[in-house]
Image: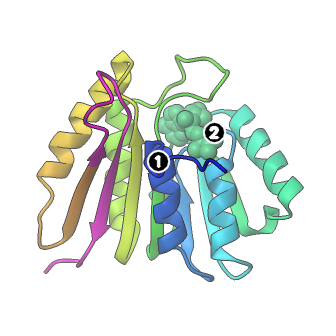
Amino acid sequence: MTSAPYLASARQLASRVFTELLNAGDRAVDATLGNGHDCALMCRLVGETGHVDGFDVQEKALSNTRALLDALGLTARAALHLMGHERMAEVVRPGIRLAAFNLGWLPGSDKRLTTRAGTTLSALEAALGLLNTGGMAVVCVYPGHEEGAREQQALMEYARALPPDRYTVLWHCFLNGGPGVPGCLMIEKISFGG
Ligand SMILES: C[S@@+](CC[C@H](N)C(=O)[O-])C[C@H]1O[C@@H](n2cnc3c(N)ncnc32)[C@H](O)[C@@H]1O
């Protein structure tokens, strides 16, 4: 029997982190709902007593996610917000365990509605402010298109400058994957600082 490669993709690494990090009763944010696959996984992991706040700027992403959660019986565990993730602090209380970003555009839809460096950075900053100690922001980055390359550069500069006494920052990339290969940025909040 052949099994899938362990290091298959940035998204697969991200999903593994979600699975290790999230426990029943946790609160989490899916900053880019898309078709709802990450949101469904998070809803399953936080259990009946947990909660997921999800964001997207497209009604189609919300309806696709709602349909998936309905089919899986997970709807009650999530609130879906038709708003930019950069505004997440308006509706999410501090104390979340995970903020997940899967950048880019909704698969099969208008590529111009992609995430953008400026709002992605604002949203990441907001997410870090909402994390509990021990919580994590996980960002899958796709530098193979123009705006994705800008996002990667901006994220690298931002993350490199985070104070090491408050955050641990890890950049996973596939070194032999060629130009534009996706990567996964992980930022763990280790203290609130003074
Ligand atoms: C690659 S998809 C996410 C895939 C999703 N995580 C899944 O599991 O199916 C990226 C999503 O980000 C959304 N997006 C773009 N700009 C956004 C913003 N400012 N705030 C929230 N979502 C945004 C797009 O509409 C798109 O649906």
Does the beta carbon of the residue at mark 1 sit less than 8 Å from ligand 1?
no
Which of the 4 image quarters holds residue 109?
top right
- Determine whether, in the image, residue 102 is placed left or right of residue 55: left
Q: What amino acid type should be assigned to the residue bearing mark 1? A: Phe
Q: Position of residue 65 (x, y in %)?
A: 74, 46
The secondary structure making up most of the magenta span is: loop
- Determine whether, in the image, residue 159 is placed left or right of residue 151: left
Does the beta carbon of the residue at mark 2 sit less than 8 Å from ligand 1?
yes
Q: Residues within 10 Å of mark 1 (few under 14, many from 20)?
A: many
- Depth order, front residue of 25/176: 176
Give the vertical position of 78 relative to 27 (above or below): above
- Please, what secondary structure does the residue beneath circle 1 have? strand
Q: Residues within 10 Å of mark 2 (few under 14, many from 20)?
A: many
Residue 56 visible: no
According to the image, label 2 marks what residue? 34
Indicate which quadrant contains ligand 1.
top right
Q: Position of residue 173 (x, y in %)?
A: 29, 42
Which of the 4 image quarters holds residue 78?
bottom right
Membership of 177 in magenta stretch: yes
Q: Position of residue 191 (x, y in %)?
A: 23, 79
Membership of 132 in magenta stretch: no
- Measuring 46% from the left and 47% from the top, which residue is drawn there? 101
Q: What amino acid type should be assigned to the residue bearing mark 2? A: Gly
- Depth order, front residue of 171/65: 171
Task: For the C terminus, give its image quadrant.
Answer: bottom left
- Measuring 64% from the left and 71% from the top, which residue is drawn there? 45
Q: Which label was assigned to residue 134?
A: none
Q: Which label was assigned to residue 101?
A: 1
Give the vertical position of 161 relative to 28 (above or below): above
User: Mark 1 to mark 2: distance in Å?
Assistant: 10 Å
First to last magenta residue range: 172-194
